[in-house]
Every structure is written in structure tokens, then in C-alpha cells.
Image (cartoon, rainbow, N blue to C red):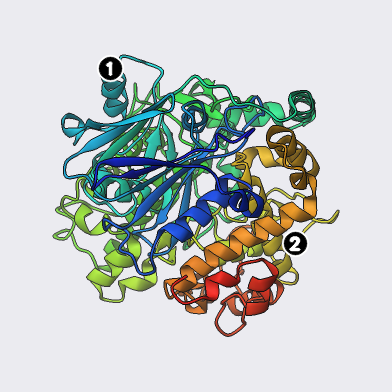
């Protein structure tokens, strides 16, 4: 088999056993790879109603069919699990070198189930595998874990996916970390911690065989030409997403827990501010975009601090929610979250939530242990991050995520918990970008900005040759479906979201086909069908868990309170109209939001309606 390794490693931590499976040809035909494989494997693996942190829960790590090849920007990996934060389907994506190393080590995917009786890590190398004791690593941060495992294995080139203290202690939004690249969202690190699994370490030397090497090389040459000819290539390669101004100028940079959309003093954290503290760029495996940045603070309170990052979402997480704009804090907070193993978006949301409750008098100085959570005061932020990671003080509550924390606090605090399906909302105010907002509201993951990113509204990318009015509601159901299905297509190869602007389905299909030899991948209609199938399977995973239309909902703030100022002033989110349009275009029942029998039959997903399936 070409492109793929044709090996899935199955790990039972309870029984301390391994087994191997080859790829089912039906899985390849129906789901192609990457995000398709992960969705199907997780759907099949988990019984309905399983406790996300119980022994029967699973983690599915997947590399795409193009990972480890010379194709650019396919070095990302995904991990699939039932989220402890949302109780639903989840996939989280990380960069670095882990995906390629998984392929070099001989596997397309690793499925982990059970629970080890003491901390372990997995050592997977050149087709072999073993458990190794991780007791001495338990409690260590992600940086030290990388260092010590590499020392233990006498190989500085070992690639890792690991958790920090937050994952070990069950913080609901703990991430999984690999060389300072993070699969941050949804609590994958929490699931890993619940299994006493500290890390997966990989090393391999096997090259990826290609079906048609010369055609593949030509497709890669075309890809490189497209990168080089793009007028934004140099700018993005230098700055990545370190440009907070792009949403601020639209008036959708969420400020003071999503009350406003413009941050005063944003020029302190804009792209030119980051230009001054960038030391050098960094990249994932085989990515000439090298969008990552190593940054170092040279003056002010945080002088001498450094981080790999922060990227856009993290810059927002430690500024907008608290009404601050200290670039130094964004760098320190980013590093601290990476070390302790926290998702920066949910951490920032939890802190912003606490600030608003403090302002409203729902949380007092007694509750916060003396911390003064007043807007503009960023002094408590690092203490709060540490308290969340170690579940100390007010951090014990905030570690649950804003939805669960609000349920425990009561006193009407739920109206200030900014989440969808339990997933805290990222750095886009949906009121000023309706298709982007609609995607975050309907995504199976909860409020995920990458599920169907509306570049047409945020960056003015044309749709069917026309520009899109970001405030309009007409046609946003169709646009959202297109963006979500299209993203699901790129995910079949686990293509980096930032690279998708250089692709069309024809070039993507050519890369997939020449790597794997599957000619149907050349057909854009085939890819569109698979993308839609994946979205509907993820939806049916959630329906099996009891999700329906009631879960496609935003906090009332977006529906009732117009944005008070800035370029999106006066906008609210017209949830009902947008949702009805979206369900109609999707072929989902308008009352329940569940895919109809006819739609499931069209996509070959009838089995999801069978009892127990
Ligand atoms: S664009 Fe950035 S995040 Fe994406 S693969 Fe390249 S280096 Fe990694």
C-alpha cells in the first residue's frame, strides 16, 4: 500500500497489551484518511454514553496520507476523543513533527483505550512498541517531559505528544503538547491524564512509498510555485497569525467577556509590535510557510521572558477578556499554558468569565483569595493560570470550564458563561461575521473557529466570484455548509488550515492520488461527498449522545445585546433565521436539527440510525 502505512496500532492500557490492524479498504474508500479516519474510528470505538474520562473511553491519534512526504504543510496530526468539556465528539489538531514521525515509525493511527495502573508512556519506534514507566515524569511540565524522555531514550530527535500537570489533575480543557505545538482544545490532555498516559514517544526511519513518484513530485512543484507566487506569502511566513488588528478593524475582537468588539490600545499587540520581539520563525515538518515565531520580551515587567508563539487566539486570550494590552503578558501566559498543559482559549475565557462575575459582585474578594479581578488589572493573570492548572483556590472552579463553573456558582452566572455546547468561544464575535458565527454555533465540537472558517467574511475572500457582506444573513446557510464541508475535505489529508488558500480540489486530489494510487481521489465531487459524510457522521455521534437543536445555541448576549461601538456597532446574531436556513441546506430536520433518513442514505450513513450504532 502506498501513501498509507496500512497499520493501526491498538493499545490497551488496562491489559498492558498491543495489537495491530491493517486499514479496511472500505474505510479508505469512504473516509480517505486523516480527519475522515479519525471520525469513523472514534464513532466505531466508543459505545454511546461512555464516560469521557472512564476506562472505556478512547483517544485516536491520526496522521494523514500525505504526512511525512515532501508535500508542504501536511505535517499536522489530529487526536479524536469524546470531550470531557462538551460530552460530545471532538477532534483537536497539533503541528510540529509528530504526524510525520508516526508515519516514519510505521503507523497511520494509534488507538488508546483503558487505564494504566500507574503512569506510563508509550515508546513506538520503527514498527515496534513498548510501555515505559512514567512515574518519574508525573507532575513535570511539558518542556521537562520532552527533555527527560529524550534523555531516557538517548535520542534528541524523538518526537512526543505529552501532557502537563493540568492534564494529570483533570483540568477539563487540558491539551496535548508536541514540541511547543498544541492540540489544545476540548480536553484531549484531560482524557490522556485520566488514562495515566503521560506521553507517546515516536521515532522511525521508514520513508513513505508513493504510488506515482514523478506525478507526485510535479504536484508538489506546482504547490511550491503557488506558495511563492502568492502576494501574501512573505507576510504570512514572517508573521503567521500575530496580527490582532485583523479582527479589531472589523469590530469583532471580543473584549470584556464578549461585551465589546474593539480593544483600546490594540496597537500594543498588533503585528508591528510583534515584529519588534520576534527572534526567528519556526515551522512544522516540511512547511515552507514557517508561520511560527519565537518571541522574546526585552523590556517591561516581563523582560527576558520568551515563548514559541503566541498566535492570534492566545494574544486575544490574555488581552481582550481582561481589557489589557501588555504584549509581555501574552508571551509569558502563552509559555506558562504550554508548560502546564492548558488550552489558552478556554483559559482566557475562564479568566474573562471570572472578571465579569467579580464586576457583578457574584464572585467576591473572598472567593478569589484576595485577587482583584478588575478590568485593566492584569496582575492576577499568571496566578490564575497556575491556580487553574493545579486546581487551587478559585482555579478549582475555573478548571471545570465556564459552563460547569457557572452551574456550580449559580446566582445567574450562566448568562456570563460564553460557550457553545460547553466549548468556550474563541476570538471572534459572531455578531459581526454571520457565517463564521453560524459555523461556531453548529459545529459538532462546540464553538470552534476552524470548523468552517468564513474567510469570505474575515478576509474578504470571494465566494463563487462574489464578495460577501459579513452582516447579511441571506445565503449564510449555504456558505456555512460549504466552509464546513470544504474544511472537512482538507482535513482528509490533515492539511494545515493556513495552507488551504493555495489549494483547490484538483491539486489536492492530484497529491492524494499520486501518493496513494486511489484514482477516485481525483474527482472533486467524490471529495465533496466525503467531506459532507464526515460532517454528518460527527453530527450523528453527537445525536447518539442526545445532542440536537437545543445545543446549537449561543449565550443570550449575542442575540439580545447589539455590539455597542466600532465597525460592527448595532449588530446582533439572528440565530433562529440563520439556523433554519442552515438546517434546510444541510438536509437536517428543522425541528430537531438531526440529519434526515434521506440525507443519511445519500451519504451512506444509514447505519447510524440502527439501534446501538
Ligand atoms: S502554516 Fe504554520 S502551523 Fe501550518 S503547517 Fe506550516 S508552520 Fe505549521
Camera-side residue of 20 and 544: 20
Residue at screen point 73% across, 67% down: 478
Q: Secondary structure at mark 1?
A: helix
Residue identifier under label 2 = 469
Q: Position of residue 106 (x, y in %)?
A: 49, 30
Q: For the residue carrying disc 1, how many other residues have a C-alpha within 10 Å: few (<14), some (14-19), or many (20+)?
A: few
Q: Is residue 464 above or below residue 379?
A: below
Q: Is residue 577 visible?
A: no
Horizontal relation, residue 132 to residue 86: left or right? left
* Residue 151: numbered disc: 1
Q: Position of residue 69 (x, y in %)?
A: 62, 27
Ligand 1 is located in which of the four quadrants? Answer: top right
N-term-proximal mark, 2 vs 1: 1
Q: Is the shortest distance between ligand 1 and the CB of mark 2 under 8 Å? A: no
Residue at screen point 14% across, 53% down: 369
Q: Is residue 64 above or below residue 156?
A: below
Amino acid at each position: 500500500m502506498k501513501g498509507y502505512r496500512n497499520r493501526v496500532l491498538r493499545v490497551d492500557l488496562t491489559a498492558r497489551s498491543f495489537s495491530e490492524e491493517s486499514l479496511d479498504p472500505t474505510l479508505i474508500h469512504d473516509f480517505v484518511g486523516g480527519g475522515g479516519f479519525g471520525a469513523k474510528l472514534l464513532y466505531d470505538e466508543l459505545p454511546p454514553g461512555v464516560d469521557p474520562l472512564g476506562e472505556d473511553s478512547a483517544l485516536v491519534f491520526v496522521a494523514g496520507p500525505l504526512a511525512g512526504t515532501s508535500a508542504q504543510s501536511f505535517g499536522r496530526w489530529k487526536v479524536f476523543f469524546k470531550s470531557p468539556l462538551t460530552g460530545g465528539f471532538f477532534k483537536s489538531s497539533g503541528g510540529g513533527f509528530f504526524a510525520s514521525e508516526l508515519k516514519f515509525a510505521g503507523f497511520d493511527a494509534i488507538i488508546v483505550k483503558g487505564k494504566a495502573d500507574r503512569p506510563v508512556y508509550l515508546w513506538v519506534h520503527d514498527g515496534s512498541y513498548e510501555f515505559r514507566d512514567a512515574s518519574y515524569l508525573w507532575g513535570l511540565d511539558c518542556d521537562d517531559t520532552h527533555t527527560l524522555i529524550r534523555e531516557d531514550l538517548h535520542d534528541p530527535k524523538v518526537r512526543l505528544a505529552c501532557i502537563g500537570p493540568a492534564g494529570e489533575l483533570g483540568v477539563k480543557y487540558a491539551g496535548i503538547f508536541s514540541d511547543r505545538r498544541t492540540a489544545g482544545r476540548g480536553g484531549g490532555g484531560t482524557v490522556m491524564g485520566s488514562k495515566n498516559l503521560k506521553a507517546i514517544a515516536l521515532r522511525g526511519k521508514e520513508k513513505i512509498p508513493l504510488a506515482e513518484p514523478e506525478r507526485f513530485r510535479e504536484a508538489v512543484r506546482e504547490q511550491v510555485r503557488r506558495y511563492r507566487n502568492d502576494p501574501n506569502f512573505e507576510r504570512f511566513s514572517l508573521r503567521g497569525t500575530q496580527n490582532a488588528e485583523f479582527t479589531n478593524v472589523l469590530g469583532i475582537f471580543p473584549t470584556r467577556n464578549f461585551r465589546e468588539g474593539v480593544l483600546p490600545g490594540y496597537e500594543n499587540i498588533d503585528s508591528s509590535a510583534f515584529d519588534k520581539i520576534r527572534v526567528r520563525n519556526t515551522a512544522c515538518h516540511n512547511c515552507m510557510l514557517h508561520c511560527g515565531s519565537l518571541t522574546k520580551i526585552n523590556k517591561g515587567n516581563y523582560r527576558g521572558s520568551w515563548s514559541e508563539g503566541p498566535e492570534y487566539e492566545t494574544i486575544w486570550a490574555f488581552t481582550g477578556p481582561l481589557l489589557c494590552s501588555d504584549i509581555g503578558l501574552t508571551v509569558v501566559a502563552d509559555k506558562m499554558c504550554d508548560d502546564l498543559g492548558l488550552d489558552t482559549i478556554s483559559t482566557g475565557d475562564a479568566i474573562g468569565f471570572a472578571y465579569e462575575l467579580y464586576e457583578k459582585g457574584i464572585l467576591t474578594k473572598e472567593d478569589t483569595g484576595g485577587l482583584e479581578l478588575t478590568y485593566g488589572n492584569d496582575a492576577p493573570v499568571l496566578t490564575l493560570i497556575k491556580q487553574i492548572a493545579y486546581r487551587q483556590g478559585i482555579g478549582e472552579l475555573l478548571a471545570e470550564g465556564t459552563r460547569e463553573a457557572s452551574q456550580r456558582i449559580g446566582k445567574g452566572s450562566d448568562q456570563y458563561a460564553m460557550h457553545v455546547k460547553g466549548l468556550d468561544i474563541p476570538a471572534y464575535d459572531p455578531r459581526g461575521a454571520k457565517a463564521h458565527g453560524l459555523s461556531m454555533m453548529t459545529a459538532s465540537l462546540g464553538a470552534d473557529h476552524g470548523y468552517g472558517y468564513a474567510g469570505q467574511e474575515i478576509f474578504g475572500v470571494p465566494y463563487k466570484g462574489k464578495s460577501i457582506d459579513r452582516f447579511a444573513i441571506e445565503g449564510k446557510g449555504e456558505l456555512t455548509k460549504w466552509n464546513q464541508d470544504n474544511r472537512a475535505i482538507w482535513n482528509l489529508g490533515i492539511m494545515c488550515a493556513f495552507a488551504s488558500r493555495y489549494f483547490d480540489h484538483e491539486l489536492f486530489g492530484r497529491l492524494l492520488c499520486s501518493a496513494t494510487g486511489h484514482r477516485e481521489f481525483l474527482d472533486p465531487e467524490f471529495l465533496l461527498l466525503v467531506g459532507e459524510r464526515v460532517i454528518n457522521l460527527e453530527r450523528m455521534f453527537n445525536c447518539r449522545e442526545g445532542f440536537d437543536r437545543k445545543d446549537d445555541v449561543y449565550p443570550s448576549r449575542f442575540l439580545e445585546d447589539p455590539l455597542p461601538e466600532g465597525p460592527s456597532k448595532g449588530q446582533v446574531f439572528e440565530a433562529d433565521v440563520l439556523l433554519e436556513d442552515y438546517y434546510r441546506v444541510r438536509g437536517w430536520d428543522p425541528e430537531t436539527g438531526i440529519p434526515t433518513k434521506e440525507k443519511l442514505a445519500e451519504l451512506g450513513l444509514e447505519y447510524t440510525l440502527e439501534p446501538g450504532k
